[in-house]
Image (cartoon, helix red, strand yellow):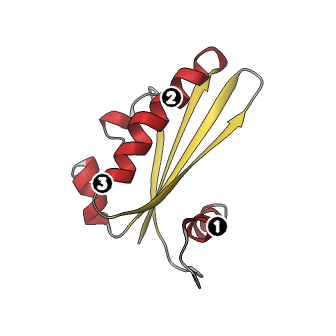
Amino acid sequence: MIARVWHGVAPESRASEHLKYIREELFRAYREAAGNRGAILLSRRRTDCTEFLLLSLWESLSFLEALTGPDADGAFAKELINPSPMVKNYEVVVTHLPNPSLEEVVVAVVSFVSI
């Protein structure tokens, strides 16, 4: 399984616009793509901007590449709402999913990414 982390920053004056775009375009593109195992959008307000972190889980790199193209480590068109978004992919090494609901999957990914 692959965990993809997309991070973008919006100036406070455009935070609502970015959130709307991320929800309606980027988050939806992830959810509707074959091989997607779930996604979660997080936000963090700062003094003059809002940070967005979108975590998504993929069955394999090949499913992710079907969405992104051959450069899965780069941002694809819908992820370019920010001029320089941070995109990273991680192999999920350890999970604990006794009842694999989205909330438990997300806790496993957040725990893994924050190590």
- The quadrant in which the N terminus is found is bottom left
**Left or right of residue 104, residue 93 in this image:** left
Q: CA distance from mark 1 to mark 2?
A: 24 Å
Please say whether residue 21 is visible from this viewpoint. Answer: yes
Q: Residue 5, percent across and down? A: 50, 52
Q: Residue furthest bottom?
A: 98
**Left or right of residue 36, residue 20 in this image:** right
Q: Which mark is residue 107?
A: 1
Please say whether residue 73 is visible from this viewpoint. Answer: no
Q: CA distance from mark 3 to mark 2?
A: 19 Å
Q: Is residue 97 above or below residue 105?
A: below
- The disc, 3 or 2, on the residue closer to the chain's N-terminal end is 2
**Left or right of residue 87, residue 9 in this image:** right
Label 3 element class: loop
The residue to which callout 2 is attached is 20
Q: Amino acid at mark 3?
A: Ala
The residue depicted at 63 percent of the width and 62 percent of the height is 110
The residue depicted at 57 percent of the width and 44 percent of the height is 53
The residue to which callout 3 is attached is 33
Q: Residue 14, percent across and down? A: 58, 18
Q: How many marks?
A: 3
- Badge 3: few (under 14), some or many (20 or more) residues near its Cα, within 10 Å? some
Q: Amino acid at mark 1?
A: Val
The residue depicted at 49 percent of the width and 55 percent of the height is 39
Q: Which mark is residue 85?
A: none
- The disc, 1 or 2, on the residue closer to the chain's N-terminal end is 2
The residue depicted at 43 percent of the width and 28 percent of the height is 81
Front residue (pair 46, 71): 46
Cβ atoms under marks 3 and 1 closer than 8 Å: no
Q: Residue 74, percent across and down? A: 35, 45
**Left or right of residue 32, residue 90 in this image:** right
Q: Residue furthest right?
A: 47
